[in-house]
Amino acid sequence: MKGGHNKKSVRVEFVMSEAEAELVKERMAELGITNLSAYLRKMAVDGYIIHLDMGDIQEMIRLLRICSNNLNQYTRRANETGNIYAADIEDIRTRLDSLWDGMDKLIRGFANIS
């Protein structure tokens, strides 16, 4: 495609019942899609649309940020005082174990997508 433009030149029209149109709207709403043309084009070409709930991934990112922030604080304290506390190390270890468990669940969920 020259110039980065996606040129669509073939027009396809079809008729559906009110019930079918409602069903299409419901499925679009479930997927969070608002562009009817894009939805119908994707369904016509691929036959399916995969919608991923990114809530779990966003939670994992949030937990990783918290863990990174704590690690930075522990590192700063170790550099200032020359001491590393066993409780701090255990706290980080516990948080990282929890994160790995969550990541394992996410990966298993992705593996079950067909």
Image (tube, rainbow, N blue to C red):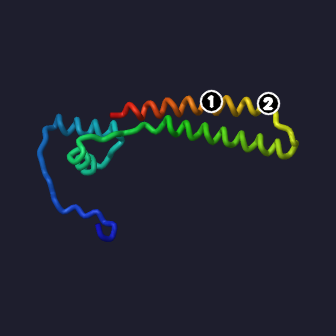
Residue at the location (32% across, 46% down)? 34
The CA distance from mark 2 to mark 1 is 16 Å
Q: Badge 1 local density, few (<14 within 10 Å), some, or many (20+)?
A: few
In the rendered structure, the answer to whether residue 100 lies left or right of residue 2 reads: right
Which comes sooner in the sequence, label 2 or label 1?
2
User: What's the residue type where badge 1 is placed?
Assistant: Asp
Where is residue 113? Give x, y as percent. 36, 34
Above or below for 60 versus 35: above
Quadrant of res 6: bottom left
Taking the spot 55% from the left edge, 36% from the top edge, the residue there is 59
SS state under label 1: helix
Q: Which is nearer the eye, 56 or 109?
A: 109
Circle number at residue 86 = 2
> Residue 28: x, y in percent?
30, 40
Q: Residue at x 61, y 39 (%)?
A: 64
Q: Is residue 45 above or below residue 8?
A: above
Residue type, numbered disc 2: Ala
Q: Quadrant of the N terminus?
A: bottom left
Label for residue 97?
1
Image point (16%, 59%), residue name:
10
Relative placement, left or right, of 89 versus 58 is right
The image quadrant where one finds the C terminus is top left
Q: Position of residue 103 (x, y in %)?
A: 53, 34
Mark 2 secondary-structure assignment: helix
Crowd tier of the residue under label 2, counting other residues whose Cα lies within 10 Å: few below 14, some 14–19, many 20 or above: few
- Please identify the residue farthest to the right as the structure is shown: 81
* Image position, residue 19 (x, y; %): 17, 34
Residue 102 falls in image quadrant: top right
